[in-house]
Amino acid sequence: MNDPVLVINCGSSSIKYALVPDTPDLPRQAGLVERLGSSDARLKGHDSRGEPFERALAGDDHVRALEAILDGLEGRLPGAVGHRIVHGGERFTRATRIDDEVVAAIEATADLAPLHNPYNLQGVVATRQLFPELPQVAVFDTAFHQTLPPRAYRYALPEVLYRDHGIRRYGFHGTSHAYVSARADALSSLEGGGWLTAHLGNGCSTAAVREGRSLDTSMGLTPLEGLVMGTRSGDVDPGLHSHLARRLGWPLARIDEVLNRGSGLLGLSGLTNDMRELEAAAEEGHAGAHLAIEVFCYRVAKSLAALSCALPRLDGIVFTGGIGENSPLVREKVVGHLPHFGLGLDRAANAATVRGREGRIDGRHPAAPRLWVIPTDEEGRIAEETRQLLKGPAR
């Protein structure tokens, strides 16, 4: 398949899109619909010449938004549509061509990702309505982590909860971890390297990847487990829910809301979930901002150290995501918490590797694990998996 793939990442109030050509050197048309559901919904993007544009939408639903995206593609029709789907449960271990049965199966996993899957499906429904003749493919965040062994994905809970209800660790950000670990292999001239990958953005996760297979990861049943994130708490004592219910009388819905939307960097700092703003505030002496950065970096390092148990050999650490790619301070602090790994940070290289630059930031000692900053390309990975699936028999 040589035609471009339209990659759709559909949320509750936004749609990210990218028209990904089959030749990596060609420019992408990409953009974002934001504030869906409101009267000021807007489409922002770049046209085929790379020029930015912005326009108001005539309607505020997903079908109207996708019609506006199609108009913004200037007549360049895709050969297929690739959808980011957050949770695929245990059924979906790879990219899958979408039909009615697949839609129903994704709907059945909605309770595992209630903040994501229902909105991902809205994009599927809308694009199937607009492009009924085009093949459409679901690419799952969880699929890359289906190679975890039972010792990594099982919780220490009664067997019936796993057997009958699928309660286990699934992991997320799979397309990002897959892309940057494969890229690290290529850049390092290694076949099947052992990498610790850190996807650090508003959502954060780490993974241990060996020979292109995920062996462990920080997120679990839901994207709430693991690291401190922008507004998500990450790991907390499982008894916190009952403690807050007894002590404060909070219902489960409020506890869930606080842990998902009012915690993390925002909750610790009392200021913002934006790492750039936190770094500036910490420089000016804001105690909450300083604490948020310290907790964030320590927890990333702690997770990487724990995940190293999954690797027979550590070839290096890869930083990616908005924070991982653009915060030399965070990278330096994380590496500083791991002296026993024999890591050597090149401060000049670290400071220079920002704004989408790809680079190696270690001292290049031949015996030391490598440190890479690799901008993630989830859209490119989704397009690649879509193409690979469509080259073979539909399933």
Image (cartoon, rainbow, N blue to C red):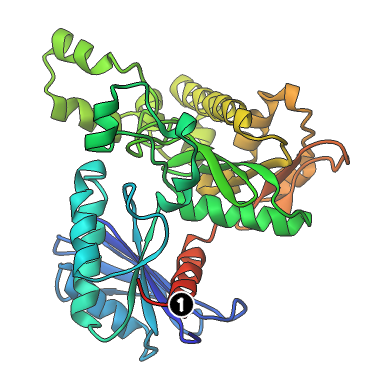
| Nearer to me, 172 or 296 | 172
Callout 1 amino acid: Gly
Which type of secondary structure does the marked residue at label 1 adopt?
Answer: loop
Residue drawn at x 14%, y 64% is 39
Q: Position of residue 275 (x, y in %)?
A: 48, 38
Furthest-top residue in this view = 247
Q: Position of residue 189 (x, y in %)?
A: 78, 57
| Nearer to me, 134 or 15 | 134
Q: Is residue 375 visible?
A: no
Q: Position of residue 141 (x, y in %)?
A: 40, 52
Instruction: Judge from the rendering whether residue 118 lies leftward or rightward of residue 390; answer left or right.
Output: left
Furthest-bottom residue in this view = 75
Instruction: Judge from the rendering whether residue 329 lies leftward or rightward of residue 346; answer left or right.
Output: left
Q: Is residue 38 visible?
A: yes
- Please identify the quarter of the rendering in which residue 30 is found: bottom left
| Nearer to me, 334 or 111 | 111
| Nearer to me, 48 or 366 | 366
Residue wearing tag 1: 392
Are there few (<14), some (14-19), or many (20+) residues within 10 Å of tag 1?
few
Instruction: Judge from the rendering whether residue 62 lies leftward or rightward of residue 21; answer left or right.
Output: left
Residue drawn at x 15%, y 60% is 37
Residue drawn at x 78%, y 43% is 348
Instruction: Judge from the rendering whether residue 271 lies leftward or rightward of residue 59; answer left or right.
Output: right
Answer above or below: position of 27 versus 62: below
The mark total stands at: 1
Residue drawn at x 82%, y 36% is 368
